[in-house]
Each structure stands twice: as structure tokens, then as C-alpha cells.
Image: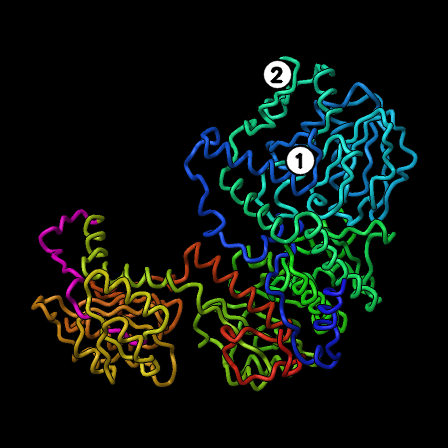
Amino acid sequence: PLQAKQVLQDHFYCSTQQLKMSQPAKPNCPNFSSGPCAKRPGFDPAVAYKDAPFGRSHRAPVGLNKIKESMAMTKEILKIPKDYLVAMVPASDTGAVEMMMWQLLGPRGVTVCHWESFGSGWMTDAEKQLKLPKLRNLKAPYGELPDLKSIDWNDDVVFTWNGTTSGVRVPNADWIPDTRAGLTICDATSAAFAMDIDWSKIDVLTYSWQKCLGGEGAHGMLVISPRTVERLESFKTDRPMPKIFRLTKNGKLDKSIFNGAVINTPSMTCFEDYLDALKWAKSVGSLDGLIARSMRNLDVIKQFVSTHPWMQFLAKEPATLSNTSVCLVINDLSKEQVKTLIALLERNKVAYDIGAYRDAPAGLRIWCGPTVETKDVAALMNWIDYAHDKVKSGNIKKMKIIVTDGLAEGAMKVLKAAGHEVVKKKLSKEELAAGALAEWDAIIIRSATKVTGAVLKATAAVPGSKLRLVARAGVGVDNVDLKAASAAGVMVVNSPLSATNSVVELALAHLLSQARQIPRADRGIREGKWLKNELVGHELAGKNLGFIGFGRIGQGLGKVAKAIGMNIHVYDPFLPQHVVDAFGATRHETPMDVFRACTHITIHAFLSPQTKNMVNESLIGVMPGVAPDGTKCGNHIVNCGRGGIIDEVAAAAALKSGKLTSLALDVFEKEPCGKTPLLEAERFQGSPHVGASTIEAQNRVGAEIAGAVLAALDGSPPPGNLVNKDVQPKFAAPKAKM
């Protein structure tokens, strides 16, 4: 408690003004999921798994000993009585509970106590699957316990110690009599290793590794008492019993299962992970230390709730409050606003997976088990306070987003999941000019939609205009008037990272296609011509490849070109020298110098007044046509950057005269390109601006631009995506930082 109090003082008692002006510190670990849960502090798989018996049988001594060691440590840490048996069983906690229900229930009446989703699942099993004739459904709504004193202890009783989806636990086991006739089957998956279990009241206890110890999934743990063994050996059921449920052989308990001989093949890596977690548990004080860690985490949230009247525990009674799966209700936000708050925390990498369980009342579910650090819980609560203020004040609200040029479906789902209205709809030039964007908070475009100064001016002129963001799903933003956008307070963001590899591969494809004259070969075959003797190409190895622009895409292509033996030449006045040195490239002071040195040119620059029609008759005219190795390979240009950088009329003339051997364009001055003199040239090859048109790039572009849009609408776009950095955004404080 003293440690928790100090953490609270350190983290909660910052001034309200400080919280309003800046973000609180983020948790070091944002993993607050209630399963699988956070790994132990300091977890390093290279260390944890260094002795894992990869590729070895679980029956071999090395594997068997690992299993036996983990069972022995489990008994020691959980203080399990000597005459109780422990085993690992298939299918996580679910498999452990159901295998015992299938084998034990039937000779007596059964009471299923439940007050949340998973307990309700055991009731469904008993009623719908096992079809037990004498069955009592003892239930309570979320936040409460049923009347446990009303249980008839002649019945077998199935219950959860801690309701993972409701945050309600049994305070102790005093309600279970020592003289009971029936068995107790306890699902303790989110209680084991964080709550004190009175073993004299338990006949069957199950849990999984993925909860309080932050282990891996799919493996269940089973603890049974001598009374349970007696039932297993005396009760004969005629119901079908799958192999993974069977604990007896010839009417007797199969003791080998409780001595390391597991029912089916386990993951030895997961066992190694469990052993690592058990060793860590011992290092922090075993069960008592684990409980203390979890309780300190709960104390942080208790203190927060006591000082923030808009938040309350879902659990109605303090004695039933879970110290692992802590469920909270925010009583001054709507369900949609709570979703917005949760999405805000997730995309800022503050907290993952803390939304209430799908069947539970809307709210938060924060895992506070032993592997979670108390300082991280405190940091999270500060962020919740900060995010709540943002959502409540309306700074973060439902936005209308229009997508005019297409976007990956996954990105659409992300935007909608954050609570925004997202509509795919094309807008004509006339509609844009009439101010149609005024009704939208954001527009997501590709290259087709032009957000000109006139469009922005018309939008701003509409009373109550809402437009605050233009998002370019791609790199180039020459179809957006940045100066006009900044003047209007409209942010412009792009996605510069996502299409890099796809554009690199297309540029390489054009280079190879030029060298081997693939388009001409294809046309010849279609026309019935076998042009084998005419289609003598050249290798790219040993040729000089000149780059006009050497950013991410240029460098990506440079790596591939260098790997196949090309010599790299670069013109990029903004490029740090160490990048040039790393490629062993030759740097040139002017584009003219690059063209003079290279038989192959690739364009990766932005369109600007300085680069408009930069590649003209003069530059093409100085290309050498002969490679350093003496090969008369001709001159070749590829442009997968921006249309308008190459003077297409001059290029067509150069192709006709033979000064330019081949030209490959993915981008054109006007798109669609329509009729152009380039189409008359046999050695021209084109693609319709498909540089980013791959499944992978579209998914990445969508994800990146969705993240940028969400951040920007929250108040502060990420620096790597904001293009017009001088903008003072509309409807957001200049100092807001989300």
C-alpha cells in the first residue's frame, strides 16, 4: 500500500493545467489485455528460451523433466496440498473445465453459479450439451454475485473464482462447507497466482498459463483433490468421451498424466515459457509476492476512481472487486464515446485491448495481474483522464470522412471502428468547385482528385465549413495546393512509407523490360513474328544507372540495382553525404552531369516549378549511349515518380530520332494520358500509374493513412505524415498534441 501510494503521488497529482496542455507520460508497456496477458517484466525470449528443447520429444528425458519440474513448481508456489494432483491438459482453461464436467457430472444434482460470460458458458454446457436432468441455474447480473448461501451442497457446484469479464470475484471460500457432499469445480483462470485459494474447499481447480503469469495460450492446468479421484474411479458415464478428456484407464485414474505423461503432444516452447514465468514468480516472493503486486495495481485504480466521479467499478460490492480483471464504467460518456476513448488510447500506443468484453456493459477492462507494473497502471489512468477530457469536451468527436479515389477495406474498417462516418463517393470537378467539401471534416484522395486553391477557397466560403484535413493515400501531394491549404487551416497528410517496395519493383521491371525489349517481343509473337535475331538486348550489370532524386524509393531501387552489378550515380541536393557513401555511389552537382555519365536514368523527384519538364531535349542529348564496359546499349529512361517532369513531346522526338533508345513511363503529365505522340514510338512502354497498385502496398497505404487521419482529427498529426507543417489547424489548439 505504501508503494502504491507513492506511485499515486508521483503520477496523479500533476496539475490540471499540465494535463490540459500536454500528454501525460505513456506506460512503458501498453499491454493491458485480459488474455493473453502481459509478459513478465524484463521478459527476453532469447534468455527465457535458451534452454528450450526445440525439436525434442516431450517423452525424452529432457522434455519429461521439464514437464515434471513445472508441475512441482506449480504445487510449491500455489501452496497446493501434497495429496492433490497437478497436470497439464489440452485446450487451455476451457478444455480443463469441460473435461472435468464431462467426466464428473451426473451422479448428483448440479448447481452452476455464474455472473459473467465464461460462467454462463459452463451453464450452457451443462444444459445444452450434457443435458443434466437435475440442474440449477444460479446466476446474477454483471457487477453482482448470486446468493451463494442458497446452494444445496448435496449438489456438485461449478463456479468461477473470478469473473474475468465482470471484474467480480468471490471474496473467499467461507461459503463452501467442509462437510459438503458434492464436488466443487472451480474455474480460476484469472485468479490463480493472484488470489489466495483455500484448497480445503476446492475439489477441481483449472486455469491457463496466459493469464496471471503472462504465459502462452492453448495449454490448460488441472488440480484435483482425493475426492475427485474417488469420483473419477466410481462414476461410469455412457456419454462419449474424447481422448483429450480421458483421465482414467480401465476404471482407474491414469496417474501417468499427473506425472509428466501428458494426454497429447504439448509445445515444449510453451513449457519453457511457463517455467520462466514460475522462476520469476519465485523471485518476487512466490504467491504472496504475486498477490501483493496485483493488489498494488488495484490500489492505483481505486485511488483514481475515488477522485474521479465519472468513473466507477462495475462490481457493486468492494469485497467482490477483482484485483486482476478490473472492470470499469464511465458514466458520463455514451457507448460510442467510450469506443472513441479506447481507440484513442490504442492508436497512441497507450493501452491495447482494454474495451469491455463484448457481452458486458460498455466500459473498460484493465488487466492488473502480477506481470503488470504499478507505474504503468498509474500512467494509464492519467492517460484515461486526459483522453476522457478530450472526448467529453468534444475535441475528439465523430467526424465525416469522404473517400473519393478508393481505399483498402481494412483502412475503412479502422476509421469506422474509431467512431467516424466514412463514405466512398466520387466528386466531380463542378461539385468540388461549388464547395462540396464543406460538409466533410476530412477527404481521403489518391492522385485523381485535385484539391486546388480554388476548391479550398470555395470550401472555406461555405458558412460553417467543416473541412480540416486532406489525406493523400500515397506519397506525392502535387494535386493539393499546400499554400492554400495552410492558409485555410487545413492539414495535409500523406503516406510516404507504404508503397516504397511496390514502386521499386515496378521501376526495376521497366528497366529489365527495356533491356530485353519484352514489349516488342510480346507484340511480335501476337502478330505471328519470330523476332529472335532482331531482339538482341543487353545486361544491366556494368551499366551506369543515374538517379534524379534518391529518397526512400530511389535508395530501395539502388540496393537492387547495385546487387545486380549496376553503377549508381546520384543527383539529389538534399541528400546527406553519408547515404551516398554507403552506396558507393557517384554524386553529381547537376542533372546534366548525371545524364552525361549514364546510359540508364530513373526519375524519383517531386513535381515542382523547378522540375517541370526538366528532362528535355538538352538533357537527353548528352546521354552517352555507350556503357563504361564499351557496350553500345543505347539510352534508356524510366519515370515512376511524377508526371510532368519529362517533356513528353521532346522525349517522343528523341525516340523517333534514335537518340533515346527506350522510354518507360508509369506517370504522365495528363492522366489518363489519352492520345500522345509517345504511343507512336515502338520503344515506348507505359503503365497507367500503377506503382502503388499491389495488394500489399494498398493494405499498407490504407493502414498508414488511416492512422494519420485518426491522429490528425484528434488534434496532432504525426510529424512523419504532416506535409504542410506551417499550418495552424482548424478546430484544434495549436499546442494540442495527440
Q: Which residue is mark 1?
A: 94
Which mark's residue is nearer the viewer, 1 or 2? 2
Image position of 453 with respect to 191: above or below? below
Q: Secondary structure at mark 1?
A: helix
Dot 1 crowding, Cα within 10 Å, few <14, some 14–19, many 20+ = many
The N terminus is located in which quarter?
bottom right
The kind of residue on which mark 2 rests is: Lys
User: Which percent across, then down, holds residue 569?
Assistant: 22, 74
Region in magenta: 527-549
Q: Is residue 729 left or right of residue 65?
A: right
Q: Is residue 447 magenta?
A: no
**Residue 730 in view, yes or no:** yes
Q: Secondary structure at mark 2?
A: strand
Residue at x 71% of width, y 79% of height: 20
Q: Which residue, as the protein is rendered here, is positioned at the far right? A: 150
User: Which percent across, then down, holds residue 622?
Assistant: 16, 80
Magenta part mainly helix, strand or loop?
loop
The C terminus is located in which quarter?
bottom right
Which residue is nearer to you in this view: 427 or 371?
371
User: Which percent across, then down, holds residue 376?
Assistant: 65, 63
Q: Which residue is mark 2?
A: 249
Q: Quadrant of residue 616?
A: bottom left
